[in-house]
Amino acid sequence: MSRNPILNGLSASAYIVVLVLVMNFGTKLAPRSSQLVAPVAVVSLFTLSAAVMGYIFCYQPIQLYFDGKKKAAAQLFLRTVAVFAGFTVVSLILLFTRAFS
């Protein structure tokens, strides 16, 4: 991805938003699926999401690590996780403030 943890965190959040939108609109547009197709789609989506998130969170830190910059690799990974955690906390706050109002 990039060496900017804010951009990485935003990318992960944007990926999740796109998935949620596709799933939300897809369930309204798609007809009822068979008992075989739905589980295959869910497991495939989970696997794809793990690969995408692994790339977003780990690609640049692994590159830095193999370049001998272990401290920079750890800092980039932890900062990216921290930024993503911040977005997660904001989304949870929005969820719970709207749920109790």
Image: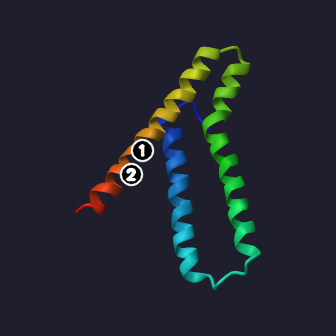
Residue 100 in picture, x, y percent from top left: 26, 60
Q: Quadrant of the N terminus?
A: top right
Q: Which residue is mark 2?
A: 91
Mark 1 falls on what kind of element? helix
Residue 3, relative to residue 15: is it above or below? Answer: above
Mark 2 falls on what kind of element? helix
Q: CA distance from mark 2 to mark 1?
A: 6 Å
Identify which amino acid the numbered label 1 is placed on.
Phe
Q: Which residue in the rendered view is the most extreme toward the left?
A: 101
- Identify the colour scheme used: rainbow
Identify which amino acid the numbered label 2 is placed on.
Ser
Residue 46 in picture, x, y percent from top left: 67, 56
Q: Are marks 2 and 1 in contact (CB under 8 Å)?
A: yes
Residue 29, relative to residue 14: is it above or below? Answer: below
Q: Residue at x 63, y 45 (%)?
A: 53
Which of 32/9 is in front?
32
Q: Residue at x 54, y 39 (%)?
A: 8
Q: Which residue in the rendered view is the most extreme toward the bottom?
A: 31
Which of 8/91 is in front?
91
Residue 47, relative to residue 74: is it above or below? Answer: below
Local crowd size for mark 1, using a 10 Å CA cut-off: few (<14), some (14–19), many (≥20): some
Residue 36 in picture, x, y percent from top left: 77, 75
Q: Quadrant of residue 96?
A: bottom left
Q: Which residue is mark 1?
A: 87
Q: Quadrant of the C terminus?
A: bottom left
